[in-house]
């Protein structure tokens, strides 16, 4: 089953919507030919997107969608050393996979902050000329020292009041490559006594002799985030610049830069406005690109798309559907204060999405031989089951029951624990969609491991026949016949970390790695899915939701990833 990108239902009301509603009512962004709501998702292409970004994508694209506006995808690519085209490509693919599009009315709103380098540079010169910025050759340490402390004003740089013409000349020479890295910076001239540290004459340009993945060696000065971001928003005529709470302290600076540019005639009203919302923190997960990178480079996982990784490529490979992630983001909502969301909320979203869509099939993950000693040797009893129990239109699966079958190792116990209703000597269970059987014995190898289970079947007990009602059994187990199954590799994953908050408070998250988070078994799946294309989702009866691995699975060499287990009473027995 592939995802149909079903539309996300109307998002619940939240403070961002209230703000947008108020802006629309006031006519704040009424402009010719432009929608009232233009948002943007602005990732830095320095890594793969993670589940936290999914929230930001759903908020930004979702809000634009809800108001008939548009959302831009903008690469915030101003740190050339850490960025690459590999990340740019993956981010685009992931946004599309999630079901969103930056094309609106036939126009692609795919942007790069680097597209604005020239414009940003011109604006910077204008700020210098207006006395709002100056070139400083204080050392990085001096600048840090000058900033002061939270409750103590900073000190002004001795260069702060140099003539604009001098700063302009130096800035041009910075651009021309006359100075070494770290020797000169351009700083906004704001207020060294501001309560906002970000307003204490922040650096807005620095020298970097780095090759940029798009602009090559054209530039040796690069604008910093606080200058780039607000200006990029304004150039793109963004209305609502939605970002996470950690940028709250940057908002005064965002507004300062834009208002100064309006004042000097470089930009026009209405200006974009920044609104912050809580970032997503997910238990048992890491959502920091830097730390995810560390897991990859130190070989703790099998790459960015390892199915245990909370990167969106990892989550996708694990089998989470785009609809399930959108559902998850909708359920967690948009709040103003940070909180932790439990991993089980994400897991439940994929169950809820797949329950209605995923075809059913049988898989035996850890096979154990079951021999029906009184079953005719050459006989193959035809059996059937619905592809989906609630949607008969999805059809029926046909398979056979034979003398020798595969069952799960876990469905047999030599000494049954209390409450175990499945196979043990003397107990009766139903083979799902087949016969009732009674366990008669088992074989072991020299080490005492069970190698086969023996049982007798009751010929008049077949599911769907009148006789089946005469048998009341508590256990109902799944099985496969050699004649109706094919081998498959089964990859069962558990949470990557055993600590709910693996990196909270600066903890060493590597120490919280679950050493037992990946299990590979050689099992069998029903032959009706022998040709399963890659990335097809199933519910394996009694076992959970699975997906054919999008990288490794091929007909003839099937590989399935366990997405999540079923929320099912079976698990407890
Ligand atoms: P990281 O800290 O992992 O490097 P980042 O915040 O630097 O992530 P960006 O590429 O700068 O990543 O983020 C793009 C957008 O995604 C930003 O607007 C940011 O606010 C948002 N974002 C990042 N992490 C989360 C999160 N955990 N929850 C919600 N939004 C997030
Ligand atoms: Mg960032």
Image (cartoon, rainbow, N blue to C red):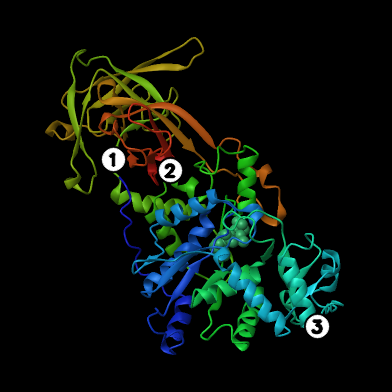
Secondary structure of the residue carrying numbered label 3:
loop
- Residue 501 in view (yes/no): no
Q: Which residue is mark 2?
A: 563
Residue 339 position, x and y percent, is: 58, 64
Compare residues 294 and 231 and report the one nearer the observer: 231
Looking at marks 1 and 2 on the same chain, the residue that comes earlier in the sequence is marked by 1
Residue 221 badge: none
Q: Which image quarter holds the N terminus? A: top left
Look at the numbered discs 3 and 2 and tell me whether their residues touch, using CB distance below 8 Å: no
The residue shown at (40%, 79%) is 34
The residue shown at (70%, 68%) is 205
Q: Which image quarter holds the C terminus? A: top left
Alpha-carbon span between mark 1 and mark 2: 14 Å
User: If the picture is divided into quarters, which one holds ligand 1?
Assistant: bottom right
Look at the numbered discs 1 and 2 and tell me whether their residues touch, using CB distance below 8 Å: no
User: In the image, is residue 299 above or below residue 294?
Assistant: above
Alpha-carbon span between mark 1 and mark 3: 75 Å
Q: Which residue is mark 1?
A: 360
Looking at marks 3 and 2 on the same chain, the residue that comes earlier in the sequence is marked by 3
User: In the image, is residue 454 above or below residue 123?
Assistant: above
Q: Is residue 95 left or right of residue 177?
A: left
Looking at marks 1 and 3 on the same chain, the residue that comes earlier in the sequence is marked by 3
Q: Which residue is mark 3?
A: 163
In the rendered image, the residue lying farthest to the top is 446
Look at the numbered discs 1 and 3 and tell me whether their residues touch, using CB distance below 8 Å: no
Mark 3 vs mark 2: in front: 3
């Amino acid at each position: 089953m592939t995802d149909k990108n079903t539309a996300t239902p109307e998002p619940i009301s939240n403070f961002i919507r209230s703000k947008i509603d108020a802006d629309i009512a006031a006519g704040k962004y009424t402009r010719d030919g432009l929608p009232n709501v233009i948002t943007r998702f602005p990732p830095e292409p320095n890594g793969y997107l993670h589940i936290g970004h999914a929230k930001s994508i759903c908020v930004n694209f979702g809000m634009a969608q809800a108001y008939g506006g548009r959302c831009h995808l903008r690469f915030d690519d101003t740190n050339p050393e850490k960025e690459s085209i590999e990340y740019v490509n993956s981010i685009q693919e992931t946004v599309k996979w999630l079901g969103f599009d930056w094309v609106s009315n036939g126009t692609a709103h795919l942007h790069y902050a680097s597209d604005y380098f020239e414009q940003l540079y011109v604006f910077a010169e204008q700020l210098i000329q207006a006395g709002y910025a100056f070139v400083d050759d204080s050392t990085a340490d001096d600048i840090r020292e000058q900033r002061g402390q939270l409750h103590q004003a900073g000190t002004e740089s001795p260069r702060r009041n140099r003539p604009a013409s001098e700063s302009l000349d130096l800035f041009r020479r910075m651009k021309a490559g006359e100075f070494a890295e770290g020797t000169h910076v351009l700083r906004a001239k704001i207020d060294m006594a501001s309560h906002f540290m970000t307003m204490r004459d922040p650096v807005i340009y620095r020298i970097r002799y780095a090759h940029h993945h798009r602009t090559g060696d054209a530039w040796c000065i690069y604008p910093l985030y606080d200058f780039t971001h607000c200006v990029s928003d304004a150039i793109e005529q963004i209305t609502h610049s939605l970002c996470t709470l950690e940028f709250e302290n940057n908002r005064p600076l965002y507004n300062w830069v834009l208002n100064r540019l309006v004042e000097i005639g470089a930009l026009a009203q209405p200006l974009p406005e920044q609104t912050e919302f809580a970032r997503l923190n997910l238990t048992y997960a890491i959502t920091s690109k830097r730390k995810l990178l560390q897991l990859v480079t130190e070989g703790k996982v099998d790459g960015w798309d390892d199915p245990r990784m909370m990167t969106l490529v990892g989550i996708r490979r694990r089998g989470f559907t785009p609809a399930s992630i959108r559902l998850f983001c909708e359920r967690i909502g948009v709040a103003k204060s940070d909180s932790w969301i439990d991993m089980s909320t994400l897991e439940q979203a994929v169950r809820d999405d797949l329950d209605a869509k995923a075809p059913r099939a049988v898989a035996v993950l850890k096979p154990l031989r079951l021999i029906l000693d009184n079953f005719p040797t050459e006989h193959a009893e035809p059996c059937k089951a619905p592809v989906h129990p609630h949607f008969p239109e999805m059809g029926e699966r046909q398979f056979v029951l034979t003398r020798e079958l595969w069952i799960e190792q876990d469905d047999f116990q030599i000494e049954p624990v209390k409450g175990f209703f499945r196979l043990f000597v003397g107990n009766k269970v139903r083979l799902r969609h087949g016969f009732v059987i009674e366990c008669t014995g088992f074989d072991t190898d020299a080490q005492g491991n069970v190698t086969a289970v023996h049982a007798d079947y009751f010929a008049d007990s077949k599911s769907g026949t009148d006789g089946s009602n005469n048998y009341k059994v508590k256990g109902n187990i799944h099985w496969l016949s050699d004649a109706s199954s094919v081998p498959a590799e089964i990859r069962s994953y558990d949470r990557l970390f055993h600590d709910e908050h693996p990196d909270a408070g600066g903890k060493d998250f590597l120490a919280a790695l679950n050493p037992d988070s990946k299990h590979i078994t050689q099992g069998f799946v029903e032959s009706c899915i022998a040709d399963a294309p890659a990335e097809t989702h199933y519910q394996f009866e009694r076992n959970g939701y699975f997906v054919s691995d999008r990288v490794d699975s091929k007909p003839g060499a099937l590989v399935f990833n366990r997405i999540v287990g079923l929320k099912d009473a079976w698990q407890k027995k």
